[in-house]
Amino acid sequence: MVDRQPHKPGSIIITGASSGIGAYCARALKADGWTVFATARKPEDIAALQADGIEAFYLDYREPDSIAALVDNVLARTGGRLDALFNNGAHAQPGAVEDLPVEALRQQFEANFFGWHDLTRRIVPVMRAQGYGRIVHCSSILGLTPALWRGAYVASKHAVEGLMLTMRMELRGSGIHISLIEPGPVVSRIAPNALPWFERYVDHERSVHREAYQAQLARMRGGGSKSRLKLEPDAVHAVLRHALLSPKPRPHYVVTLPAKIGAALKRILPARLLYRVLASQS
Ligand SMILES: NC(=O)c1ccc[n+]([C@@H]2O[C@H](COP(=O)([O-])OP(=O)(O)OC[C@H]3O[C@@H](n4cnc5c(N)ncnc54)[C@H](OP(=O)(O)O)[C@@H]3O)[C@@H](O)[C@H]2O)c1
């Protein structure tokens, strides 16, 4: 198939641009020359993006009407075209799997999985019609390996990996490329933003895991892990650029040393040993 991708900045939807990776990438891609359509949920976050000259819209992945409205609004502005989509907005539902009510998993999957699928499905026909497009999903190293106390989030990211890698194969020859970014620890608000979800759904005082939860609570209240190996969101921007513009975008971009170690261990260790090593991390 003829490569019709322009290989230069065009138009892109970026979700979850109120903080962390999305907030950084929206501004960085604008500086790179992209026409950025960013989404947030709170009016003040939408206003902050607009103040930086970015077209910003309301989107909550758990509300299908907001996904439809976003796509209509963006396509009205671009004349029905879109070069790229960066699915990024998500939340983390902490808690041991045995402590998670089904509703916590439903909420996790509405935000991190069903909403991503819905938005992607609305964009694929646009890209098919134009003969090219880039779709990048901000997955996680936890889309490749499990981690203690993060089962809901791990499940949602594994689900994204499975669905989107399948779609990637199905889109062969269409000119549409799908990439997954798998970060490890990156500076953002993901840990403090997880605290209300933990308090809403996990009866932690009565859990058999209540002692282990103390460290998790301290981490969330303290703004996240203090690892020296944590990177700033520019590390994600660097690989996002590659996924968007390279003639040969990669299926996977593993970001941060801890994530690279995790991915390597998964390849080389026997399963039993791998899970023992992972269970020693919390
Ligand atoms: N930071 C890390 O260490 C790390 C590692 C691996 C993967 N990731 C992935 O990176 C992506 C960005 O997260 P982040 O670390 O930058 O965290 P963040 O600072 O918490 O940003 C998450 C963004 O997603 C938005 N969001 C949350 N729920 C949403 C929903 N239902 N619909 C639409 N948007 C929603 C948030 O909006 P509000 O402000 O309105 O809540 C916020 O804009 C996520 O997919 C996350 O899983 C992060």
Image (spheres, grey):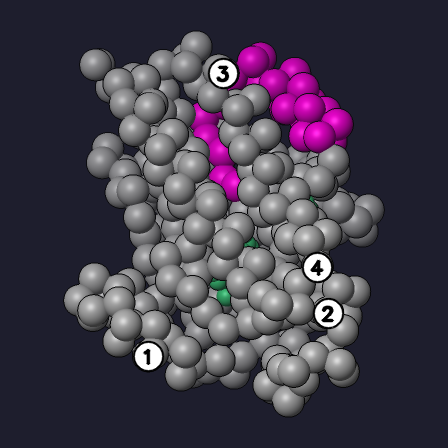
Q: Distance between the Cα atoms at labels 3 and 1?
A: 44 Å
**At 53% from the left edge and 24% from the top edge, which residue is drawn?**
121
Up-down: is 124 above or below 34?
above
**Disc 2 versus disc 1: distance between alpha carbons?**
26 Å
**Mark positioned earlier in the residue sequence (1 or 4):** 4
**Observer-nearest residue: 223 or 214?**
214
Residue 21, percent from left and from top? 53, 56
Q: Residues within 10 Å of mark 1 (few under 14, many from 20)?
A: few
Inspect the magenta stretch and tell me whether residue 171 lies in it.
no
Separation (CA) of disc 4 from disc 3? 38 Å
Q: Label 2 neighbourhood size at 10 Å, few (<14), some (14-19), many (20+)?
A: many
Q: Are marks 2 and 1 in contact (CB under 8 Å)?
A: no
- Is the residue 79 above or below the residue 279 in the image? above
Contact flag, marks 2 and 3 (Cβ < 8 Å): no
Tell me if the residue at label 2 has its CB under 8 Å from ligand 1.
no
Kindly report which numbered mark, 1 or 4, lies closer to the viewer in this rendering. Answer: 4
* Nearer-the-camera pick, 167 or 125: 167
Between label 3 and label 1, give the one nearer the viewer. Answer: 1
Q: Going 26% across and 67% down the picture, which residue do you hit?
A: 271
N-term mark: 4 or 3: 4
Q: Position of residue 217 (x, y in %)?
A: 67, 81
For numbered disc 3, what is the local secondary structure? helix
Marked residue nearer the N-terminal end (2 or 4): 4
The residue tagged 2 is 202
Q: Does the magenta segment cover residue 84? A: yes
What kind of residue is marked 4?
Pro
Q: Quadrant of the N terminus?
A: top left
